[in-house]
Image (cartoon, helix red, strand yellow):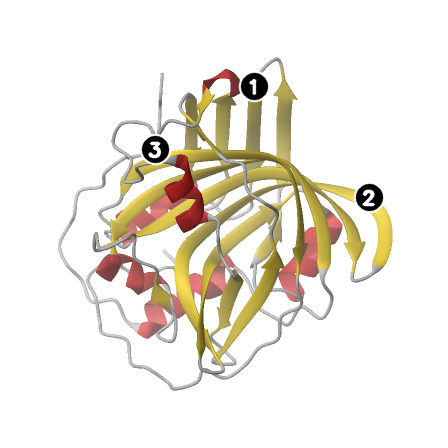
Amino acid sequence: MIVSSSPRIAKGKDEIVTTSDVQALHSRLGKVGNQPVSVSSFTNKRMTINYRAPLERLRQLVPAPIEIDEIRDTGMGMISMCVCDFWVTKFGPLPIPTTHANEMLCRISVRVPKKGATYRAYYTLRSDSSSRLLGFLGGHFSHFRKAISQFTMRDQDGVYELTCKARDPISGGHFRAELDSITKEPPPGSTFASIQEATDFVFQLDGSCGYSYPARKLSFQHIEYPTWDLYFCTAYQYQFALLDYLFERYKLDAEFDCTLFMQNVPQVWGTSWLYAPDTPQPRLTMTSSPEAGD
């Protein structure tokens, strides 16, 4: 049986979203800074829960220089929650004592400009980590807006389960999957016709990105990805406070699409430095959200 958080949120009365509303949300969710050292990691398992939403709705949540990546010509973009655990093995070229972390991360598929080029990337709104070391460093020296939170994990008897208890009530959540439900066949209702199409859109990226509102600067990070071998997961249950918050407050009109599964994945997260956007672009006002800090 599939159980999911709010597959569709009804629209309420339209309200104008201002830059200060979005900036307040980002300030609440975490900081963005330079990442001067690359990080090598090995992921045990990762589940990515994907929702599609109209482009104009998702545009509310990202700064003007960044554009939402469109799924084919559907007029829809994607907001996702990643649930994973991994080991960090190196900072730059230097091995470190192997550090394990459980994480939950909210991301939006985007296109980011840098020096005249445009890169496909994911934009992180918030990430919670069980590691005090990685949570502290990522909260100050990256664009992942990391926070240190309490986690419990289960990875046995065909069950993968993570629970995150965050200090901020709009963060944290729970996920549980039955691993015998993974398949290469797309589930009913997914916009993707195949696992390859889902892989190409969600994970075949150039890297990750962020934006510092105080500095008014972008950040882009190249990521060295492996050859992907993803599956759909079709039996799970979850609840994510941040997704529920965003769907309701910003009237995203989001629809559940699919859950993707990967395991045993090496990656290298490159350095990233804040930089000024090529050309400042105004953002049209859109509908939704009362004050983010409520």
Single out the mark in the foreground, 2 or 3.
2
- Say if mark 2 contacts mark 3, CB within 8 Å: no
Mark 2 lies on a secondary structure that is: strand
Disc 1 residue type? Val
Q: Quadrant of residue 86?
A: top right
Is residue 45 placed above or below 202 in the rendered structure?
Answer: above
Residue identified by numbered label 3: 5
Secondary structure state at the residue bearing disc 3: loop
Give the left or right position of residue 164, taking residue 278 as reference: right
Specify the label residue 159 is tagged with: 1
What is the secondary structure assignment of the residue under circle 1?
strand
Q: Give the crowd class for mark 1: few <14, some 14-19, many >=20 residues within 10 Å.
A: few
> Which quarter of the image is occupied by the C terminus?
bottom left
What count of labels does the image hold? 3
Q: Residue at x 37, y 85 (%)?
A: 280
| Residue extending furthest toward the bottom | 279
Which residue type carries mark 3?
A: Ser
Looking at the image, residue 181 lies above or below residue 12: above
Q: Residue at (50%, 42%) from the top-left corner?
A: 82
Q: How far across and down, in percent of the image, does residue 63 sit?
A: 38, 71
Q: Position of residue 81 (x, y in %)?
A: 45, 43
Specify whether 239 is left or right of 188: right
Judged from this view, the residue extending furthest toward the left is 13
| N-terminal label among 1 and 3 | 3
Q: Earlier in the sequence, mark 2 or mark 1?
A: 2
Residue placed under numbered mark 2 in the picture: 98
Q: Residue furthest top?
A: 157
